[in-house]
Amino acid sequence: MRPQIVTLVAGLAIITAFVPVSAHHSFAIEYDGQKPIQGTGVITKVEWTNPHMHIYIDETVADGTVTHWNLELGSVNSVTRRGWKPSDLKAGTKIGFKGYAGREVRTRAAIDLITLPDGRVFKGASTAPDAPESLREQQ
């Protein structure tokens, strides 16, 4: 009986090694591709974490109302492959952003573009196959 268990475990290990991992959440479950958003705000916090980076922004509109945004980007790896580093996204920096609002929480967004004060533009990058074309990461 013992050799059968070893064979079964070895077989499962081989199978799982060749099956693509599909643990990534669906864009359409969390974000609304029909609800584009854009604005400008000041970075309050940046999380260089996987599976997705997050940038927290305070956007102040003309009447003084402040909206606290949670902006989701691609993975740390996808961001650094594009040449970005932690010194590019610092608390206190005013940025422009475009993306898609969250379905449940409208102040959470999948980010398409970030524009820094010096004019550099960052593409947000998502690997979700159901994300809008503009968000999909170029491999």
Image: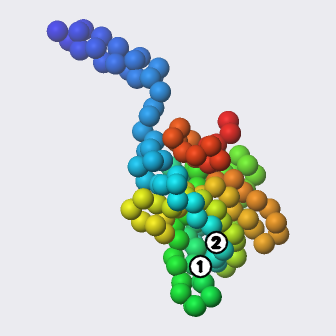
Foreground pick, 107 / 33: 33
- Determine the secondary structure under disc 1: strand
- Which of the numbered marks, if any, corresponds to residue 59? 1
Q: Position of residue 18 (x, y in %)?
A: 47, 20
For the C terminus, the image quarter is top right
Label 1, label 2: how many angstroms apart (C-alpha)?
7 Å
| Marks 1 and 2 close (CB-CB < 8 Å) | yes
Instruction: Name the residue at 42% across, 39% down.
Output: 23
For the N terminus, the image quarter is top left
Amino acid type of the residue that numbered disc 1 sits on in the rendered structure: Glu
- Determine the secondary structure under disc 2: strand
User: Along the horizontal axis of the image, is 80 left or right of 104?
Assistant: right
Amino acid type of the residue that numbered disc 2 sits on in the rendered structure: Gly
Q: Position of residue 82 (x, y in %)?
A: 73, 49
Q: Nearer the viewer, mark 1 or mark 2?
A: 2
- Up-down relation of residue 116 to residue 20 (above or below): below
Q: Position of residue 33 (x, y in %)?
A: 52, 52
- Which of the numbered marks, if any, corresponds to residue 18? none
Residue 60 shows in this picture = yes
Instruction: Name the residue at 52% across, 59% down.
Output: 35
Looking at the picture, the colour scheme in use is: rainbow
The mark that comes first in sequence, 1 or 2, is: 2
Q: To which residue does mark 2 refer?
A: 39
Residue 91 shows in this picture = no
Instruction: Name the residue at 58% across, 91% down.
Output: 63
Which residue is outermost to the left? 1
Q: Residues within 10 Å of mark 1 (few under 14, many from 20)?
A: some
**Residue 37, quarter of the rendered image:** bottom right
- Up-down relation of residue 16 to residue 41 (above or below): above
Q: Residues within 10 Å of mark 2 (few under 14, many from 20)?
A: some
Instruction: Name the residue at 44% across, 23% down.
Output: 19
